[in-house]
Amino acid sequence: MSIDPVLGTLAGTLLGMFGAFLTNIHKKRADEKDALRKRTWEKEDRDISELKDMKNIKYEVYNNILMKDGEVIIVTNAGNRLSFDFISYSKEIRPLLFKKYHLLDLDVKDKVKKMDKKIAAMAFNEEATGYDEDDISSDYYRLIEMIENKYEDQKKL
């Protein structure tokens, strides 16, 4: 009996197994890369969708504020000065601002905080001077203007 055919068969089998092993390793790495790429794409899609949802909610808040501003008179002209209706602002506008406050743009949040501090100071002093009401009225007008500008900025994108 000759050993050559047995060695040839054994060598062929070993080479075939080694080739299959290398192919499996390569396939496994490729599958892992594909799975990672797919997870990354899915995460990016979810993130984009979430950002769109948050932006839509933010603009719903802005819409509601602008609508209320048109329905409720917050600032009136009282002769030579402005009069700010603290009650209407507190009942109608402020709740809309704070319902989704975390989604508002930073400049809008800063303006709201500034107004709240002024209103708190006036409440602490238990009266508002004409200057105080002019000042808070100007802040309110600026807040509405900032919100309206958000729509203009959006058009530019």
Image (cartoon, rainbow, N blue to C red):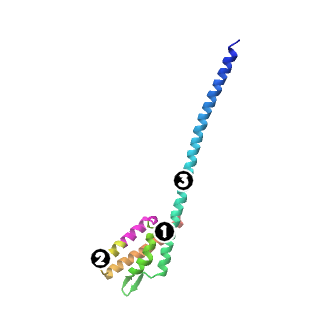
What is the CA distance from the residue labelled 3 to the residue labelled 2?
Answer: 49 Å
Dot 3: element = helix
Q: Are marks 1 and 3 in contact (CB under 8 Å)?
A: no
Disc 2 target residue:
124
**Image coords of residue 137 (percent x, y):** 38, 78
Q: Main secondary structure of the magenta part?
A: helix
Which callout, 1 or 3, points to the residue nearer the camera?
3
What is the CA distance from the residue labelled 1 to the residue labelled 3?
Answer: 25 Å
Which amino acid, mark 1? Answer: Lys
Which amino acid, mark 3? Answer: Glu
Which amino acid, mark 2? Answer: Phe
Span of residues in magenta: 102-115
Q: Establish if 26 lies above or below 103.
A: above
Q: Residue at x 46, y 65 (%)?
A: 103
Q: Which quarter of the figure has residue 125?
A: bottom left
What is the CA distance from the residue labelled 1 to the residue labelled 2?
Answer: 33 Å
Disc 3 target residue:
44
Q: Establish if 10 lies above or below 35.
A: above
Mark 1 neighbour density, 10 Å: few (under 14) some (14–19) many (20 or more): some
The answer to which of marks 3 and 2 sits earlier in the sequence is 3
Q: Residue at x 33, y 79 (%)?
A: 132
Q: Which quarter of the figure has residue 126?
A: bottom left
Q: Which quarter of the figure has residue 146?
A: bottom left
